Amino acid sequence: MKHCWLNKGNSELLIFFAGWSFDENPFKFLDASGLDVVVIYDYSDLTLDVDFSGYEKYYLIGWSMGVYIAALLKDKLPEFERTIALNGTPMPIDNGFGIPHRTFDLTLKYAAEGLKGKFYQNVFYGEEQLERYMTCPVARTIENRVEELHSLKALISTTPAEANGFYKIAYVSENDKIIPPRNQHNAWEELGVSVIVLPDGHFPFYNFKSWKEICK
């Protein structure tokens, strides 16, 4: 895994687990005032080389595949004031609770082509969001992102995440084209987690101005 600090010098820390194929760039527009923010991304391996110590309070947001990864690594993370899942589930490849197997396999098969345009057209809700993303896009290579998806498939196939009681609230976008909203609702109902519905697509961050607005 890789990480990037977006802010430092505060007494509270937000740990953000990003989704597949992303890095810190598309999230830099969010105001980080009052919080230290560290973005975790690239799940080609699960080495977590970050010092989280020394903070008074901790918050966690998992987005997309980051929801699963954060739950998988929860025993290595601090105790949180609040844990939020955003358009993801702890069962990320699942016909009833995540991305259906056939859909995921097709995404994996055509990942290199999809990352040239089609995938991000589905991630963002409308041309305006896509154009905004293109002003500060992911900087990773396509090859690196394809490798990450293969690693995720192998990991998810062999290592389930134990998420009972971990997440306290979940955001679900009603126009999510990556993970079916119905499957997300099914997963959170199964885990007894309250859901907030957003009128957006898979990448809902443009609905917010700051990290605090999302986590508090």
Image (cartoon, grey):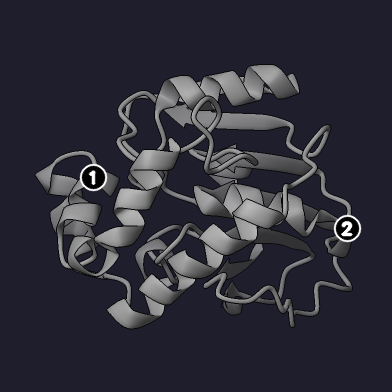
Tag 1's secondary structure? helix
Residue 74 placement (x, y as % from top left): 81, 55
What is the quadrant of residue 29 in the picture?
bottom left
Q: Is residue 4 visible?
A: yes
Residue pictured at 73% horizontal, 36% vertical: 167
* Picture layout, residue 108 above or below residue 176: below
Judge by depth and name the residue closer to the eye, 15 or 174. 174
Q: Is residue 32 visible?
A: no
* Picture layout, residue 12 above or below residue 142: above
Judge by depth and name the residue closer to the eye, 101 or 8. 101
Residue pictured at 74% horizontal, 47% vertical: 161
- Residue type (three-letter) at the residue carrying disc 2: Asp
Tag 2's secondary structure? helix
Quarter of the image containing the C terminus? top right
Residue pictured at 55% horizontal, 75% vertical: 44
- Residue type (three-letter) at the residue carrying disc 1: Asn
Indicate which disc residue 122 carries: 1
Residue 1 placement (x, y as % from top left): 61, 77
Residue 102 placement (x, y as % from top left): 37, 40
Residue density around tag 2, few if under 14, some if 14–19, many if 20 or more, within 10 Å: few
Indicate which disc residue 75 carries: 2
* Picture layout, residue 176 above or below residue 142: above
Indicate which disc residue 131 carries: none
Is 118 positioned to the left or the right of 178 in the image? Answer: left
Residue density around tag 1, few if under 14, some if 14–19, many if 20 or more, within 10 Å: some
What is the quadrant of residue 131 in the picture?
bottom left
The numbered mark, 2 or 1, whose residue comes first in the sequence reads: 2
Determine the CA span between mark 2 and mark 1: 33 Å
* Picture layout, residue 110 above or below residue 175: below
Residue 90 placement (x, y as % from top left): 65, 41
Q: How many numbered dots are placed on residues in this image?
A: 2
